[in-house]
Amino acid sequence: MYYTYLLTDPNRMSIQAGISNDLFNTMTEATIMKGNTTTQSTLNRMVYFESFLNKDEAERRFIELSSFGRIVKERLIRKTNPNWSSLHQQFYTAQHIKKAVVYA
């Protein structure tokens, strides 16, 4: 499985596209990232992602997302995540749900 995603900073000043084959680790790294050498802001909130079965489709979508302007990226985010919440916690919970075992 391959993923394209959009990261932003807490103030929503910049939005950056990315691609990954391990979204959980990417989200964890983005959450704990302390700084970025290319920008003043810290892009530590994953606010949007899409999944793909093959790498070529994901790369095409990544290029497309990267070429979009800010307004188009904002519309994509608001369509699925209107409050711009970080999706890390939701994704983490979904990955690590443990079912209770009941012994009779």
Image (spheres, helix red, strand yellow):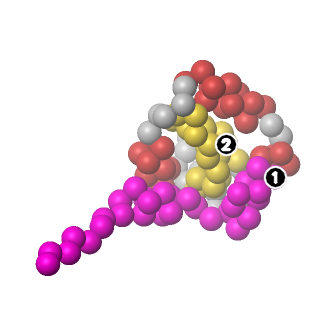
Residue at x-position 85% and y-position 48%: 71
Residue at x-position 76% and y-position 50%: 76
Residue at x-position 83% and y-position 45%: 72
Q: Position of residue 9 (x, y in %)?
A: 63, 56
Q: Is disc 2 placed on a helix, strand or loop?
A: strand
Residue 103 belongs to the span the image colors magenta: yes
Q: Nearer the viewer, residue 95 or 33?
A: 95
CA distance separating discs 2 and 1: 14 Å
Dot 1 corresponds to which residue?
75
- For label 2, the crowd category at 10 Å Cα-Cα, with few meaning under 14, some 14 to 19 and many 20 or more, is some
Q: Amino acid at mark 2?
A: Gln
Judge from the rendering whether residue 94 lies leftward or rightward of residue 3; answer left or right. left
Residue 12 sits in quarter: bottom right
Q: Position of residue 26 (x, y in %)?
A: 47, 44
Residue 16 circle label: 2
Q: Is disc 1 placed on a helix, strand or loop?
A: helix
Q: Amino acid at mark 1?
A: Arg
Q: Position of residue 73 (x, y in %)?
A: 77, 46
Residue 57 sits in quarter: top right
Judge from the rendering whether residue 36 lies leftward or rightward of residue 62; answer left or right. left
Point out the stretch of residues depicted in magenta.
Answer: 75-104
